[in-house]
Amino acid sequence: MAKVLIPLVGLLYLCCWAATAEDTGFIKYKDPKLPMGIRIRDLMKRMTLAEKIGQMTQIERLNATADVMKNFFIGKHFVIPLVLDADLVKRIGAATAIEVRATGIPYAFAPCIAVCRDPRWGRCYESYSEDPTIVQQMTELISGLQGDIPEGSRKGVPYVGGKDKVAACAKHFVGDGGTINGINENNTVANGHEIYNIHMPAYYNSIIKGVSTVMASYSSLNGVKMHANRAMLTGFLKEALHFRGFVISDWEGIDRITPIPHSNYTYSIQESINAGVDMVMVPYNYPEFISILTDLINKNAIPMNRIDDAVKRILRVKFSMGLFENPIADLTYANMLGSKEHRELAREAVRKSLVLLKNGKTNNNPVLPLAKKAPKILVAGTHADNLGYQCGGWTIEWQGLTGNNITEGTTILKAIEATVDKSTQVVYNENPSDDLLKSNDFSYDVVVVGEVPYAETKGDSFNLTIPAPGPEIITKVCAQIKCVVIVVSGRPVVIKPYIQSIDALVAAWLPGSEGQGVADVLFGDFGFHGRLARTWFKSVDQLPMNIGDAHYDPLYPFGFGLLTEPTHQ
């Protein structure tokens, strides 16, 4: 998607669709005791073509007025995309489901099961790993979001297990993490082994877990746009893998089938729907989309059985959500939004995901854990006291924000101040001068630097360098004081030029709102146990470089991570 959007309500129009005047007796689709297939067939018999097309149309929430929803029979509007060991990920999914439901939304655009093979890609931080096995394990998020699918359930049938669960979305199908040079929305050139053993495995797991929806990728696979790839969307996903949920497009995804987006919209609609896209994100041009799609159906360019298949899939998911029995937002979980329990879970995730890359300039002289009781310490760096930087992209706004007024949370600086002994003086200076460094007797320094927030194409990078003045701060401070460098980033970045001067190095990734999780491990309340889920390169000239490659020569290999034990100071 090209934006983060604020949800309106969790109400999908069809749930409020009134029965026609002649429906005075028993209405099968309204009876939750009947088998889902009977309910779907009964409802579809009652629907006009316009209502069916409305179900296939997803609009931007600012356009979702009562008149638009009624006159165009709109079936959906946008929701917020939300997104370690597998058990932790499952618990995160369950907490996310509750918070999404608390906003009135029954659907989350998660998980992203891309396998990022090149960190130059601006969406690499949305991917769990370069290794497909780890990504497969992380599909446990689906069980957290939707609930555990009952034993003996039919393979491929979507499942949502109650009012505290939401429909999940596995994305982006398929190969989005393997594009040439890591360029967003680019072409992935892959042979059969690479497609089905690297990029596809997590979809097998997702379907077994009853994932409700799959989102098509902006990217191409061997030159074919995924939004128009019938062989993969219909032939493999729906027919070979027996996926029975619905396929949703990405934001204006069908527009980008043509080299110039939206330049031949009739062609794009025809190709995407016939390829197997069931619901189309049409944030703004929904009247045009509906008009053209109606015309294509009337001309038999898109067969009616393709429309019926799409609507049947959409209704199957909506019935599994229980939307016909409970169409109105349930405020039961409103008090769980940002709850202490959920923040503690996020804090746990932070400390378990940190990776200790270096601990002392010699093996027998570790720097971490740091002493809580020290006369005076220095905290420096662009990312030490910036909640927006900790959260990264897709937070509050599409490209993320900077500063400390975007949401509630704890910066790494505030976490350090809350953790050290009351007698310890904490001096904070984002970019300390030489005079400050020379004139003060600091026991140690914590330097926090990293990437600024980004999302999608704006995050594509051919150099992967830490933005200025980060490198200057590292070089200056670490030359004069014992220093621990914390890198806040969505991916490995260039660090080799500074590694000799650094005493201890921590990859903190994007810790989000709970910076206290960083201090928990930094000062020894918990040990470092995280390991790299992606290779840390020496230079960008090596990329792409993944575990198993013939030219594999990393700075820190896949799976690397130093361990420490709690000290209970």
Image (cartoon, rainbow, N blue to C red):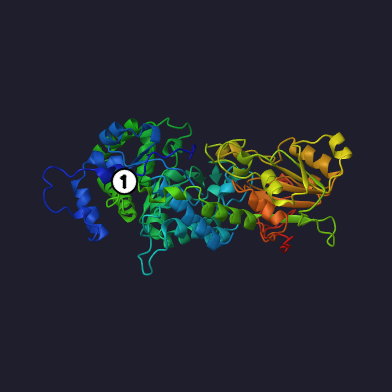
Q: Position of residue 393 (x, y in %)?
A: 57, 40
Q: Position of residue 446 (x, y in %)?
A: 76, 46
Answer left or right for 142 relative to 545: left
Answer left or right for 471 relative to 209: right
Task: Tell which of 238 and 509 is nearer to you.
Answer: 509
Task: Tell which of 174 and 401 is nearer to you.
Answer: 401
In the figure, residue 186 lies in which quadrant?
A: top right
Q: Which residue is tagged 1?
A: 328
Task: Tell which of 135 and 257 is nearer to you.
Answer: 135
| Furthest residue in direction bottom, as rendered | 152
- Locate the C terminus and report the quarter of the image it occupies: bottom right
Q: Position of residue 557 (x, y in %)?
A: 71, 57
Tally the marks.
Answer: 1
Crowd class of label 1 (few under 14; some 14 to 19; many from 20; radius 10 Å): some
Q: Position of residue 154 (x, y in %)?
A: 35, 65
Residue 130 appears in the figure: no
| Furthest residue in direction front, as rendered | 423
* Secondary structure of residue under mark 1: loop
Query: Which amino acid type is marked by label 1?
Result: Ile
Residue 18 appears in the figure: yes
Answer left or right for 567 relative to 180: right
In the figure, residue 351 lies in which quadrant?
A: bottom right
